[in-house]
Image (spheres, helix red, strand yellow):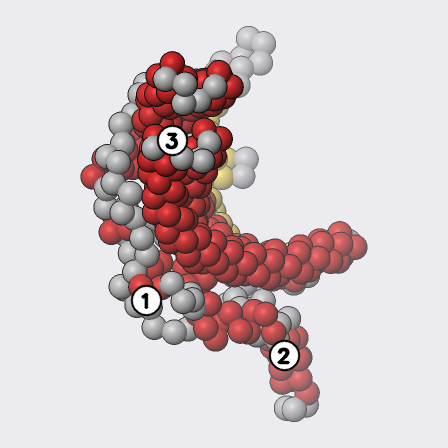
Amino acid sequence: MKTTKYILPVAVALSLSSCHIYNAYELPSENSYVKAFEESSQAAPDSASLPYLSWDQIFTDPVLQDYIRTALDNNKDLDDAVKNIEIARAQLKGAKLSYLPSVVLNPNGGAAKYGDSKMDTWTYTIPMAISWEVDVFGKILNRKRGAKVAVDQMEDYYQATRSQIICGVANTYYALMLLNQQLQLTERTSEIWKDQVESMRLMKNAGRVNEAAVVQSEANYWSIMSSIPDLKEAIHQMNNTMSILLHSYPQEYTTSGDMNFDLPATLTSGVPVSYLAVRPDVKAAERGLASAYYTTNSARAAFYPGLTISSNGGFTNLLGNIVSNPGKWFIQLAGSLAAPLFSRGQNIANLEVAKARQEQAMNAFEKAVLSASADVSNALATYNYNKQKREYILKQIDDLEKSVEYTQELLTLNTSTTYLEVLTARSSLLSAQLASLNAWHTKVGALISLYQSVGGGR
C-alpha cells in the first residue's frame, strides 16, 4: 500500500514532463539549417561591426541625416509600430495579472410591500467574492510566456519598420542625387553639342563638311535635349516619394552632391552568418516560432483540470429567513477542480491545429534565415561587382575623352577624319559617363541593402 500511493503522483509528474507544458522555448537544434544558424549566432557581438553601427555612422551626409531624423519623427508607419508595442505590453500586463486573484464587490439590498401591508424591513448584503485560479498545469504560465514573446516580436517589427524607413530615405536621397547628376551631365553635354552644331555650320560655310554633317549634329543635339524633360519628371516624382517618407506635402529636396559613400575595407570580402541573428525579420520569425510553441503548450494544458479556490464574505442583515439588525459578518471558502470530460474532442483538434501551426512557424523561420542569407550575399556581390565595374568605366571615360579631343582636332585640321567619327566619340563618352553614374548608384543601393539585410538602422 505504501508503494501504491506514490504511483499516481509519479505517473502524473512524468506525463506532465513528457508533454513539456512547463518547459521554456528553446530553438530546435535537430534542424541542420537552424543548428548552423544557432551556432554562428552565439558568437560574441562586435559593437564595431556593420549590424551594430547606428545609421548616422553609416550615412554621414549631413543633409541626408536631417531627412532621416525628420522621417523618424514624422512617419506614421513607425508610429503605428510603436502603438503595436504598447498593445502587446498591455496584453502582457494582463497575462501577468492572471496570477492574482479576482475580487468582485456586489452590494445589494431591497424591501417589499404587498397590498395594504406596511413596508417590510430593508434587507441588505454587502458581499465580496474572491476567486483564484491555481496554475497547477501551466495554463497561465504559457499564456504569460506567449504574451512576452508577442512584445518582443512587436519590438522586432518596430526595428524592421525603422530600418525600412531609414534605408528608404537613403535610397530615395541617393536616387535623387543620381538624377540630379544625370541632369547636370546631360545639360552640360547639350551645351557642348549646341556648340558642335555651330562649329559644323561654320565648317560647312568654309567647305570643310557637307550639309549632312550639320543635320546629323543637330539631330544628336535634339536627342539629348529630349532626355532632359524625362529626367526632370523623374526628379519630380522622386521628390514626391521623399515627401511621403517624411510625411510632408510635396516639395523640392536638395542633395549635397557628395558621392563619397563606401564600405569599410574589412567588410567587402564577406559577412558572417552571425549577423543574421540581428536582422529584425529573422528575430521576428523566431519569436513567431516561440509563440507557436507556447500556443501548443497551452493546447496540451487544456487536457488537464483547472483548480480554482474561491472565497465569499461580507456583511448582511439577512441570515436565512431572519432579518437581523445590526447585520452579521459571513464568510465562505470553497475549492473546485474542473476536468475536461466532454470537450476532449475539441481539445484534440485544438492541439493538432497548434502543432501544425508550430510546424508552419518552423518553416517560416527556416525560410527567413535562408532568405536573409541570400539577401546579404546578393547585396555584397552587387556592391563588389559594381564597384569593380565603375573602376573600369572610369578608365573607359579617360580614353573616350582623349578620343573626342583627338577626333575633334583631326577634323579641324581637315584630315581624313569625318564628322561621323566625332559624333560617335561624343556619344560614346556620354553613354560611358551615364553608365558610370548608374554603376555608382547601383553600388550605393547595394550598400544600403546590405546594411538593411544585416539588421541595420539603429
Percent position of residue 49, x then y: 31, 63
Which numbered disc flags the more N-terminal residue, 1 or 3?
1
Frontmost of labels 1 and 3 is 3
Give the structural element (helix, strand or loop) at label 2: helix
Residue 458 lies left or right of residue 150; in this view the side is: left
Label 2: how many residues lie within 10 Å, few (<14), some (14-19) or many (20+)?
few
Which sits in the foreground, 81 or 101? 81
How far across and down, in percent of the image, does residue 247 sit?
A: 35, 25
Residue sitting nearer the eye, 9 or 170: 170
> What residue would you read off at disc 3?
414
Residue marked by disc 2: 14
Cα distance between the residues tagged 2 and 1: 53 Å
Q: Kindly identify the amino acid type of the residue bearing the numbered disc 3.
A: Asn
Is residue 315 placed above or below 155 in the rendered structure? above
Residue pushed farthest left? 62
- Residue linked to disc 1: 266
First along the sequence among labels 2 and 1: 2
Residue at 62% of width from left, 72% of height from top? 31
Q: Residues within 10 Å of mark 3 (few under 14, many from 20)?
A: few
Q: Is residue 242 left or right of residue 53?
A: right
Placement of the N terminus among the 4 image quadrants: bottom right
**Do tag 1 and tag 3 residues touch (Cβ < 8 Å)?**
no
